Image (spheres, rainbow, N blue to C red):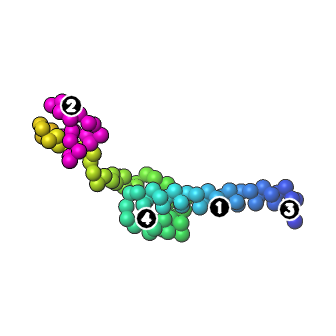
Amino acid sequence: MPPIFTRVIILLIVTSTLYLYFLSLRWLHRDAKKRMRNSLRITIAVAVLFWPLGLLIWVIFRPALKLKRRSGSGMQSCAHCQRMISVLVALCPYCGKIRTRAQ
């Protein structure tokens, strides 16, 4: 029977490895969700089959990040000069006219 110190060290190693396992799978799922639709499949494949190697392969070969487009671009055309201006400004920087409320 190993001494108590050895048992504690083994318990710490096993606990740390399990914590790292679940933490890396959580990160993988969130990262895959940002980049593609089938994030659960990727996470399960790495979790069950290829954990340390699969995680490394994902980091190297993961797809490009999808950029989300905002529904409103924050730009509108000026009623006076028809140029695109930010909705946050009250005065058109091109013609100097005040933006009306209807815009």
Amino acid carrying mark 2 in the image = Pro
Report the residue marked by disc 4: 39
Residue at horizontal 30 percent and vertical 40 percent from the top: 88
**Dot 3: what SS?**
loop
Q: Is residue 2 left or right of residue 53?
A: right
How far separated are the C-alphas under marks 3 and 2? 78 Å
Q: Main secondary structure of the magenta part?
A: loop
* Closer to the eye: label 3 or 2: 2
Q: Is residue 28 left or right of residue 88?
A: right
Report the residue marked by disc 2: 93
Q: Is residue 42 left or right of residue 70?
A: right
Report the residue marked by disc 3: 2
Amino acid carrying mark 1 in the image = Leu
Vertical comparison of 66 with 95: above or below: below
Vertical comparison of 43 with 99: above or below: below
Q: Of marks 1 and 3, which one's residue comes earlier in the chain?
A: 3
Q: Residues within 10 Å of mark 4 (few under 14, many from 20)?
A: some
Amino acid carrying mark 4 in the image = Ser
Report the residue marked by disc 1: 18
**Dot 4: what SS?**
helix
Residue at horizontal 21 percent and vertical 39 percent from the top: 99
Q: Of marks 3 and 2, which one's residue comes earlier in the chain?
A: 3
* Closer to the eye: label 2 or 4: 2
Vertical comparison of 47 with 91: above or below: below
Residue 91: x and y in percent read 23, 33
Q: Residues within 10 Å of mark 2 (few under 14, many from 20)?
A: some
* Closer to the eye: label 2 or 1: 2
Residue at horizontal 74 percent and vertical 56 percent from the top: 12
**Quarter placement of the N terminus:** bottom right
Q: Is residue 25 magenta?
A: no
The magenta span reads 84-103
Q: Of marks 2 and 1, which one's residue comes earlier in the chain?
A: 1
